[in-house]
Image (tube, coloured by chain):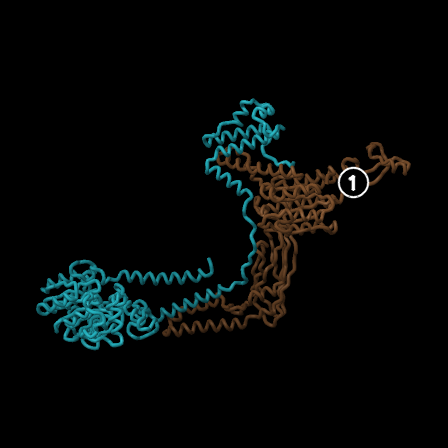
Amino acid sequence: MKRWMRVAIPFGLLTAAVTGTLIVHAVEQPDPDDPEYLTPVHVQEISGGTLAERLVAEGVTVERATTTEDAVTAVTRAGRATLFLSTPDLADLPELRKLPRGTNIVAVAPSELTLRRIDWPVTVEGSHWTSTVTDPGCADQVATAAGPAAVLRTEYQADVGTTCYAGGLVSFSHNGLFVTVTGSPDPFRDDRIAEHGNAQLAVGLLSRDTRVVWLDVHEPDITPTTPPPTRPTFEYTPDPNSTDEYYDEDYYGDGDGGYGEPGQGDGQGQAEEGETDGEGEGESNAGGGSPLRDDPFLNSLPATFWATLLLLVLILIALAVAAARRLGAPVTEPLPSQVPANETMLGHARLYAVARARDESMLVLRDAARRRLTTHLNLPPDADTEQIAHAAGLPVRYVRDILDRDPPESNSDLVEAATLLQGLVRDVTGTHTEEGDPS
Amino acid sequence: MVTRRFALLLALGLPAPILLPQPWLALGAVFGFALLLALLDAAAAGPLTGIRLDRAGERTVWLGGSATVTLAVANAGGRTVRLRLRDSWVPSAGAGPLYHRLTLTPGAAKTVATVLTPTRHGDRPAVRVTLRSSGPLGLAYRQRRQAFNDKSTPPWTLRVLPRFPSRRILPEKLARLRVVDGSAVTRGRGHGTEFDNLREYVIGDDVRSIDWRASARAHDVVVRTWRPERDRRVFCVLDTGRTSAVRIGDAPRLDACIDAALLLSVLATRADDRVDLLALDSAVRARVEGGGHRSKLGRLINGMASLHPELAETDFTLLGQEMLRRDRKRALLVIFTALDTAPMIAGLLPILPKLATRHKVIVAGVRDPIVTRLAELPADAGATDVHQAAAAHRVLAERDRVRDVLAHSGATVVDADAGDFAARVADVYLLLKASGRL
């Protein structure tokens, strides 16, 4: 094994293990772009059909809207209603300013970018590797009635309103709207709704009114008629330090930064933000500045792990350094040729065999036999078969059958003819091996 | 530079970040402690500048044998040196053991032995002795640059003499030589051409040997005695070109040529002929001529030992220039080469008539025994065997043509398998010697 491989293999295995874990985790996350994600029309793993059925059973009317504009229209059309934003990162947020005062909004795991864009008084405090079950820890009636629920994945912090489930559920009033932000989609998903108090919590949040408008969008819902930088039309004024970037590049851009990767909306979006802010990969404490800081997997690892890992790296480096210096460089010398003298001859033989050159081989053997016979019998080199037969004292017909035989039709004919030829030469010359006599 | 023990020391500190409340502090403490120990260990290692090396041992060995070369290591410094050294030779020297460990107190000297079993003939040099001084804890060591080790390495070269398997048939050939020699003295004219001396006639002597003038002067019948020619020149020409590089069995063709040339040289030296050597390919690689009769054989063996095949086409015009420039006397010119068609026709044949007019030329080519073996069909032959036999006969036919062409140009051609090649060359020499045609 080469020296560099001794170092590369352990590091490579470690990198592959970490990368593989991250990839599997990312693949396993529900994708807001997936049409099945929290949709009320299907009952599947990541859909919200079960929740819709339970709401209907509770006497709540569920209206599905596929655009933000339609959802707002549906809410304002008749009486009070709760607007359920299953994918707030994909919604056309400026439309929400048209909502009537007193409307309930339930938003599922909005990202830091979305929160800042809509200017809700909530910030993302951190993320967990998976959804965590916690106790309500607050006096909210719905939460208290539901009990422990798996709603803590993205952790929020709000200066106003009520914070439950250790930051997994935040309720507050803003511009006359009553907003509830949940940190995980698990309580609303078909495959998780039956666990813990998920069902009671989800139903309780959405049954505050007799009508729920369910915004079911799975691609960026941008109003095409809205002109580009029209910030003055916004009712809520975003952060002056960052609004231009979010508004121009992220929101109305190509969507790469604004909506992030499926299931990784927070981290990816904030990573983009960090780069545009020029913070790079530093140890910035600003919210969403460093990808490492926001990586839930890395955040969950203790300092002991990192210290031990670093010591392991140092050990590997020490081993590499110890093995790096040789006790004397390798000594080289030119090697002798390894070509056998009979290489060309055997190559010819293989060519004859592959080409089934029976005639050619037989011709060579007959010429050689004639040459040996004429030499042995002191005949001229061009002596014919009769002369050879007379000189050897053999029947002409017998010698002719061997020396002037028809070309072989098959391999067995070839072997037979060659064997007869060799026998004739041995009989006449009385030798078994060819000798090279000096002339 | 640190050793693996340093990494082991770090590994022993692995539990520290886990067990102690401050993992980063524990990490720093473990690494700092190990680094400090390593630095102290490196500082305590003995200096390499005080080490003195010297070699002794055998200078020559026959291929197939073993030689021992010793390396004396002395510590001229003022501190103890825990030394690890590597005595590097070229791989074909078959040196071992390569690594040695020594602890030398100030002023002490120790000797390490390296046994060499070479795999090829020629000069096998000692390349480098690399020194490494370790600290008392074995955590760190000192090692100087390669240039320092090159400078402190004592030069040594083991000359590996070529294999001489024909030594076993040497007594038989010498016996035949003695017969030729002795018969010439006793039987007189016809078996020798060189005048020896005069003696009185005895009954049975050939009357044609009577020297009438000497008889008149001596008042008695005096006859001349003859002996085989002596002091004839035998010129061994070894072709070290690309055709000599191919392998016959497990050795290059050149080895078989050297074996035959050695046998011929010994025979000719014993027969009081002068043997010279010329090795050439695209240039003259070795030339052994002149010098004392007794030391000649050793010089010839030494000259042949340094030869190795070059992957270059042999330029036989060099041979013509050498022979026409140097040789004013007739000589037996034995060219050890390969009877391949192209090199012979394009290389040797143009100059062969000129050489043959001034010298007796023998062209000796080694044949691969496999060719002869494959030319004969085995008992249970198949189609593949027939095709191989055809290919072998094709090769033999080409060699026969080359042999005829060379013979037509005045050369005597020896074309034999590697096993009896040397014997066949010696036989031709003895035949020429006995018939007085040198």
**Which residue is drawn at the image coordinates 58% and 26% (left, top)?**
A388
Name the residue furthest right: B219
Depth order, front residue of A231/A387: A231
| For residue A347, side relative to residue B360 (left or right) | left
| For residue B343, side relative to residue B7 (left or right) | right
Residue A171's spot in the image, x, y percent?
18, 73
**Which of the chains is brown?**
B
User: Quadrant of residue A214 in the image?
Assistant: bottom left
**Which of the chains is cyan?**
A
Q: Is residue A166 visible?
A: no
Q: Chain of mark 1?
A: B
User: Quadrant of residue A380 in the image?
Assistant: top right
Residue A366's spot in the image, x, y percent?
54, 31
**Which residue is drawn at the image coordinates 55% and 34% (left, top)?**
B376
| For residue A266, side relative to residue A346 (left or right) | left
Disc 1: CA contacts within 10 A as few (<14), some (14-19) or many (>=20): some
**Which residue is drawn at the image coordinates 38% and 73% (left, top)?**
B24
| For residue A150, side relative to residue B301 (left or right) | left
Name above or below for residue A52 compared with residue B359.
below
How many marks do you count on the picture? 1
Name above or below for residue B314 compared with residue A121.
above
Residue B67's spot in the image, x, y percent?
63, 54
Circle 1: residue type: Glu
What residue sits right under mark 1 in the picture? B194
Residue B144's spot in the image, x, y percent?
56, 67
Name above or below for residue A394 compared with residue B37.
above
Q: Is residue B368 visible?
A: yes
- The quarter in which the C terminus of chain B is drawn is top right
Name above or below for residue B393 compared with residue B139.
above
User: Quadrant of residue A71 in the image?
Assistant: bottom left
Quick one: SS at disc 1?
Answer: strand
Depth order, front residue of B272/A170: B272
